[in-house]
Image (cartoon, helix red, strand yellow):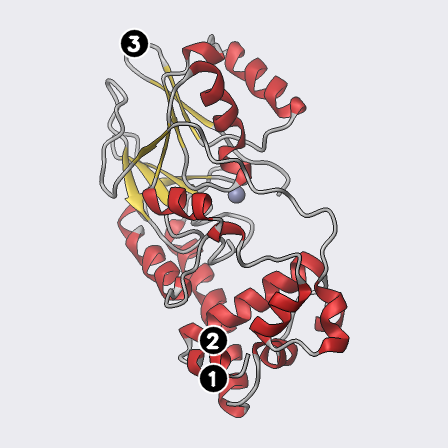
């Protein structure tokens, strides 16, 4: 991701409310402080911190601010649970045999699973406040409410500003790329692909809004973007369905090797390979091939 957008909403008393932040790094700390000062906001005076989801590129700097000024971070409870339980990172492993067994990876190929320099998961924030679907954020003089849009993570939230007709879409809908699905905790019976498609439908009532995404520039044309994104997901599902149907006994590894990957299957390794296998498993669940995939690795 080239950058993450941090949105600042000023309330009727002039206090600042932050929605999402960037990855925590010394440069980003400086950058955020400097940019806030340009609009007359100090970090100490930030009145609330809210995140669309718990990924480090959205919560990183919010965690840092929270530690300094004691303002809790508002999140959906599912993301908090998945962060605390370690489920967010469970699709990755540094133990090639754990993944090898899970996905039916042949011994001779397991070396490809090892990942170097993996990003550490964000530390659970000290103080968290839960936000529910439909909840209005406590921002004096502003109307801004949450919409639960599970898919990218189980607890992903979008935020709606009905008076300004703005949808803060986090990583649910992006202008320049297709968001990853199931990038949070995925319990064994979870079907994040179905959740994601339903969540794309869920924001249809904001099709005429300005979309302010977590990555990229604000855009109009939500309906077209939703449609394209859903088609991309369904094309992937068709591909997996065809592979599962023609090879009902195949392992997740074998199914993954039959479908098209950017850069080619043979070139996938490390985190990208682990992610490809997790995706294949997830789509297998979606197309109903879960039983075969689970029984045969
Ligand atoms: Zn993101």
Question: Could you tell me which secondary element the residue under label 2 belongs to?
Answer: helix
- Left of 133 or right of it: where is 15? right
Residue 289, x across and y down, in percent: 44, 81
Residue 169, x across and y down, in percent: 41, 42
Above or below 219: residue 292 = below
Asked if marks 2 and 1 touch (Cβ < 8 Å), the reply is yes
Residue 10, x across and y down, in percent: 36, 17
Q: Give me the residue at 41% from left, 39% from top.
A: 52
- Mark 1 or mark 3: name the one nearer the start of the chain: 3
Asked if marks 1 and 3 touch (Cβ < 8 Å), the reply is no
- Left of 184 or right of it: where is 107? right
Q: Between marks 2 and 1, how big is the CA–CA gap? A: 9 Å
| Quadrant of the rendering where the N terminus is positioned | top right
The label on residue 284 is 2
Q: Residue 156: tell me if it is visible.
A: no
Residue at image mark 1 = 292
Instruction: State whether label 3 is within 8 Å of ligand 1.
Output: no
Residue at image mark 3 = 13
Instruction: State whether label 2 is within 8 Å of ligand 1.
Output: no
The label on residue 177 is none
In the image shown, does 69 or 180 lie closer to the viewer? 69
């Amino acid at each position: 991701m080239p950058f993450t957008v941090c949105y600042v909403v000023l309330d009727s008393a002039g206090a600042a409310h932050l929605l999402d932040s960037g990855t925590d790094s010394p440069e980003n700390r400086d950058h955020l402080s400097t940019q806030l000062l340009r609009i007359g906001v100090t970090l100490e005076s930030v009145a609330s911190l809210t995140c669309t989801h718990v990924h480090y590129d959205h919560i990183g700097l919010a965690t840092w601010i929270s530690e300094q000024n004691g303002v809790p971070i508002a999140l959906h409870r599912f993301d908090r649970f998945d962060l605390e339980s370690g489920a967010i990172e469970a699709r990755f492993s540094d133990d090639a045999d754990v993944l090898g067994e899970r996905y039916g990876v042949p011994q001779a190929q397991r070396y490809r699973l090892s990942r170097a320099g993996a990003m550490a998961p964000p530390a659970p924030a000290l103080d968290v406040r839960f936000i529910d679907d439909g909840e209005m954020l406590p921002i004096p003089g502003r109307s801004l409410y949450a919409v639960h849009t599970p898919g990218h993570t189980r607890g992903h939230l979008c935020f709606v500003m009905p008076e300004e007709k703005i949808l803060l879409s986090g990583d649910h809908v992006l202008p320049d790329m297709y968001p990853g699905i199931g990038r949070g905790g995925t319990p064994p019976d979870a079907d994040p692909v179905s959740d994601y498609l339903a969540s794309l439908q869920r924001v249809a009532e904001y099709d005429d809004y300005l979309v302010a995404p977590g990555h990229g520039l604000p855009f109009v044309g939500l309906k077209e973007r939703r449609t394209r994104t859903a088609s991309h997901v369904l094309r992937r599902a068709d591909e997996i369905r065809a592979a599962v149907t023609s090879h009902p006994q195949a392992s997740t590894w074998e199914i993954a090797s039959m479908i098209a990957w950017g850069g080619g299957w043979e070139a996938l390794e490390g985190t990208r390979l682990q992610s490809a296998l997790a995706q294949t498993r997830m789509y297998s669940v979606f197309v109903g091939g879960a039983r075969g995939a689970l029984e045969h690795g």
